[in-house]
Each structure stands twice: as structure tokens, then as C-alpha cells.
Image (cartoon, rainbow, N blue to C red):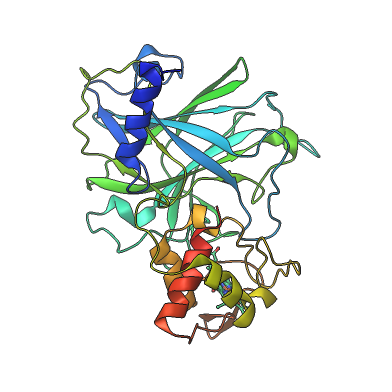
Amino acid sequence: MTPRPAALLLAVALLAVAAAAAEIPVRRVDAEPAGDPRDRSWLTLPAVELRLLPQTSVPPATLPAAGHVDDRLRVRAQRGPTRLALHLEWRDPRPAKTHGIGRFADAAAVQWPLAAIAPEPAAEPPYLGMGHRGAPVEIWFWRADGKRERLAAAGFGTLTTQPGDLRARAEWQRGRWRVVIAAAADPARATLPVAFAVWSGEDGERDGLKRVTAWQTLRLDSPMTEAAVGNDKLVAEAATADAPASRPPAGDAARGARLMQDKGCAGCHAYPGNPGEPATGPDLRQAGALHTGAYLAESLAEPSRIIVPGRGYFVETEGHRASIMPPFDGSRAERDDLVAFLRSLR
Ligand code: HEC
């Protein structure tokens, strides 16, 4: 059978982004972006499809729920004279619209580094799990029961509400949520790291029980203008932090797997092939899908530089936090092997 042209086109689009995390182009529009998620201006805009992974870095971890394994989130973005708007679309067979005792509503959120509104780009994005100390994130949060919040956080459990209005409109139709979240924002930079979270209320997801994407790039200086209208096709698909094909890891993953045992990592971290399932440190089962190779290498060399903000993960003395993870003191080759193994966890 010969592949249909549409399939070929998609394959080409996938190849084009294999080198890195996805770039989400922001279309510039003359009026403010439409608030209605079914508006033609949204549905004709090409979407970027991202992989949603259960949050497992900090307990309580989300275990892949039936029907929600390997979910996808479609993202579109537009920018008017004062407002930035994001259109999120995902599959959810049963909508959960009420929130109360023992009931949880569906929800979604967008985050980027808080400081990114300033022109000076940071060397690396904050910790994926809602930032870390000294590297706060801004969060736009929508929930199906009507709650909308503009928040800031510097790690799990540090949420504060932010001033400024946030508008959100959502629609559930034929098994899909479509949500537009918009607020006044005028980032001075050409690109912005951005990550997303989705909660499935009917599966009991709330707070840290959620599914997340890796950091992606919002392309604010995209040449896409009002005239450039697609036809609901994907511009890109990005599964993970950095695609397996991009930079082949220098190390050997099989040797890395053995080093996880020999170097004591297996005593603190859960990952496939480690029967102990210890929870002293974060669960690493998706480390390669959520984090870049550079972040993983740094996690080993300098555990206290970005500390995963989970309970019991660090000790604090006189306001200074130190990770309980010992810095890796093996050879360069061993570190490369470990990183190759961690990147294979996806
Ligand atoms: C004494 C327990 C302990 C040992 C041993 C240990 N770690 Fe960790 N590890 C932690 C803790 C706690 C954290 C979270 C705090 C932090 O960010 O350093 C962590 C964080 C990490 C992270 C970042 C995870 C994330 O979600 O961002 C990686 C990757 C990692 N460790 C890999 C390793 C590897 C590889 C080894 C073996 C060379 C190892 N760890 C040894 C406790 C440990």
C-alpha cells in the first residue's frame, strides 16, 4: 500500500521538529484573539501536539489512569495588541464540571518563567514542576467549574495569586475539551519556555495529581500572520524534552542501567528494572521524556543547583537548601552512560 499524501505531509512535519522540543508559533492578529474556542480563527490555525505524562517526580504521583495513558494535548497560540491567548484541546471521554467534597473538576494550566516577561533570558527554565526556589513561574489556571486564576509559584506548594485579569472560555463537545485562556501579557522576548498541565477530575486528579508536558518553546516572533491560515493540520508533534534522534547520547544506556545499581542510585530512585521502588528521591520512570539531557547531567553533577521541591528531598539550614542526593563523583564516561540510560526512560 502506498502512503496517502496526508500521511506523508505529517511525516515531513515530524521530521522538521525532531531536533528539539516543539516550537509553538504565536500568530499575531490585529484585533484581540477570539475568546470562543470554536471560533474559526482558532480552528483553522495549525496546532502543535504535545505528549502529556503523569506527574511522578513528587508524591503523591499520578499513576497512568486507564484511558489516559500517553495522552496528547494540542496547542495553538495567538497574540493581539495587548492579549496573549492559548487554545488547548485534549481528549476526555467524560467531562467533570463540578468541584466539591470528593468531586474534582477537569482543569488545565499553562506556565512559563515569571522573569521571562523581562527581556533578559535565563540560562535554563525553572524546574518543570512549578518552578523552584529563586526561579518562579507564572501560571494561568482554568477549571471546568468556573474557576480561573493567575498564579505564581516557586515549587510545589508555594502558589500565590497574582494580580491581573485572566479570561477563559471552554467547551466540551464529542469527547474533547477546547479551552481558550487569555490575559494581558507583553513578553519582551522572541521566545518563551512554556509547559502545560491537564487534570482529569473524574479520575480523581487534582493538585499534584496531574499530567504534564515537558518544557516547550513559545515562538512570539513567529512570522505567522493573520493571512497565514492553515486547515486544522498539525505543524509539529513533540513528544518529549529532546527527541531521541536529536543528539545521540554520548554514553551507553545498558552500561548506565548497571551503574544505577553500582553507584547506589537504585537505593533512592524508582525506575523500570529496579524492583525496590524506593521513594527517597523522585520516580525516574519518565526522566527522559520530561527533561533534557543537559538537565539530567546537571542533576547528577550538582544536585543542589535545581532542587526538586518535594518533601524530604532536601535539608534546609539557615535558609539554604541542600539536596540529600550526593553529587556524582564517577568518571565522565560513567556520567554519560547514566545520562544515556536516564534519557531512554520515556
Ligand atoms: C540518597 C538518595 C539518593 C541517591 C543515592 C541518588 N539520588 Fe538522585 N535524587 C535524590 C533526591 C532526594 C532528589 C530530588 C532533590 C534534587 O533535586 O536533588 C534526586 C534527584 C535526581 C534527579 C532529578 C529528578 C527530577 O525529577 O528532576 C535525577 C535525574 C537523579 N536524582 C538521578 C540520580 C542518579 C543517576 C543517581 C546515582 C548516581 C542518584 N540520583 C542517586 C536522591 C538520591
Viewer-proximal residue among 47 and 111:
47
Viewer-proximal residue among 270 and 9:
9
Q: Quadrant of residue 271?
A: bottom right
- Where is residue 139 shown, x and y percent of the image? 47, 46
Q: Is residue 232 visible?
A: no
Q: Quadrant of ligand 1?
A: bottom right
Q: Is residue 260 above or below residue 181?
A: below
Left or right of 256 in this view: 60: right
Q: Quadrant of residue 123?
A: bottom left
Q: Residue at x 47, y 72 (%)?
A: 337
Residue extending farthest to the top is 40
Q: Residue at x 27, y 17 (%)?
A: 229
- Where is residue 46 shown, x and y percent of the image? 35, 24
Left or right of 16 in this view: 330: right
Q: Is residue 281 above or below residue 159?
A: below
- Where is residue 243 shown, x and y percent of the image? 41, 49
Q: Residue at x 80, y 39 (%)?
A: 101
